[in-house]
Image (tube, rainbow, N blue to C red):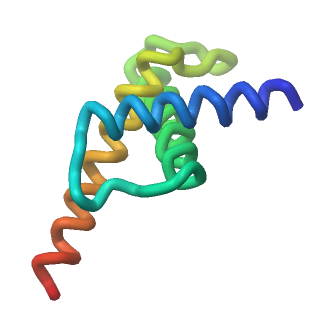
Amino acid sequence: MMQLIVAVIIGFVAGLVAKWLMPGPNNPQGFILTTVLGIIGSVVATFLGRVIGWYSADSGAGFIASIIGAVIVLAIWHQVAGRNQQIR
């Protein structure tokens, strides 16, 4: 249970930092979306780190890698949201 709470807190902070580093008019808003952004960023960073060979199967991404993963996810979000605005 404690691991889940820590993951949510780190995800929220990583999401906040990613949104601060990449401001945009269509950033995800609110606590839940910011937390989800950070958690997905952490998952992306863990996956990429395992593919590259930085992390073993039983370890996960650190805080800075989670922020980098969240920035990657946010960049993808901006691309998708930007396309939706161009279609309208």
Judged left or right of residue 46, residue 60 is right
Vertical relation: 44 (above or below) 26: above
Considering depth in this image, is 47 or 9 the residue closer to the camera? 9
Q: Nearer the viewer, residue 52 or 10?
A: 10
Q: Residue 63: horizontal and vertical position, in percent?
A: 50, 17
> Where's residue 35, x and y in %?
56, 44
Residue at figure coordinates x 25%, y 46% from the top left: 75
Which residue is painted at 43% across and 16% down in the image?
Answer: 64
Q: Quadrant of the C terminus?
A: bottom left
Q: Quadrant of residue 84?
A: bottom left
| Residue 76 drawn at (x, y percent) | 28, 52
Q: Position of residue 56 (x, y in %)?
A: 59, 14
- Residue extending farthest to the right is 1
Extreme bottom residue here?
Answer: 88
83 up-or-down from 45: above or below: below
Q: How many marks?
A: 0
Image quarter of the N terminus = top right
Please tell me which residue is depicted at 67% across the width and 30% down the height of the picture: 7
Say if 57 sits above or below 4 in the image.
above
Residue 10 occupies quadrant: top right
Residue at 57% x, 34% y: name it: 11
- Residue sticking out furthest to the left: 86
